[in-house]
Amino acid sequence: MPVFHRETSVSAATENISAASNDKGSLLMKFLLLGGLALAATVAAKKWFYPYTIEDLDGRVRYIDTLIKNNMSLRWNILGKAGPGFRRILEKRNDEVRLIKTNMNTEPDRTKIVAWMTFKWSQLHEIKACYLRLRELELDVTVEIEERMRSLRGSQNPLLASPGPRAN
């Protein structure tokens, strides 16, 4: 705060006060701007490194389950003996998803900020790791299906052969 003497004019005092408040105001604005940028960068980094949610895990489990079911049907059974093994792995991954969901209910109180942030960080890490394991399983199932389809087409299986022109 500026110091005023009796001989200071009113206009000079007004200029000194406005200059002093502008300096503090601009300093406050700089801190607010810096804090806003830091918050935005933190949110963006979280979304970049941990883009998956528990709903993504559920969707991935359903997709892989449908993929396995469709390729283990009585008509096709493309997966053959590998199908039950993939089914067991999918059940393990589904158990992991359910465990993550259950652990979400044990969230610590937000007043204990360190415990809460540690919990949230571990949840994000577990979701990402589980999602990547599900993607790996999906790729394994897809590769197995493609290899079996290729081998069945190579053996001239009449069920998988493309229909050619019919002779009358």
Image (cartoon, grey):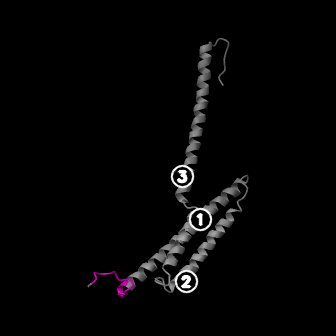
Residue 149, picture quadrant:
bottom left
Distance from Cα at disc 1 to Cα at disc 2: 25 Å
Residue 149 shown left or right of residue 3 in the figure: left
User: Which of the numbered marks, if any, corresponds to residue 156?
Assistant: none
Q: Nearer the viewer, residue 98 or 69?
A: 69
Q: Position of residue 156 (x, y in %)?
A: 35, 87
Q: Do the residues under discs 1 and 2 have CB atoms within 8 angstroms?
A: no
- The reply to whether the magenta stretch includes residue 164 is yes
Q: Quadrant of the N terminus?
A: top right
Residue highlighted by disc 2: 84
Q: Amino acid at mark 1?
A: Ile
Segment colored magenta:
153-166
Residue, x 56% and y 40% (percent of image)? 33
Q: How many marks?
A: 3
Quick one: SS at disc 2? helix
Q: Position of residue 43 (x, y in %)?
A: 57, 51
Could you give the CA–CA distance between mark 3 and mark 2, rounded to whole angstroms?
Answer: 41 Å
Which residue position is annotated with label 3?
A: 44
Q: Residue furthest left?
A: 168
Can you say whether 57 is above or below 113 in the image?
Answer: below
Earlier-in-chain disc, 3 versus 2: 3
Image vertical order of residue 155 relative to residue 32, above or below: below
Check disc 1 and report the residue beneath it: 127
Check residue 5 for magenta coloring.
Answer: no
Nearest to the observer: residue 107 or residue 31 = 107
Q: Secondary structure at mark 3?
A: helix
Spatial CA span between label 3 and label 1 = 18 Å
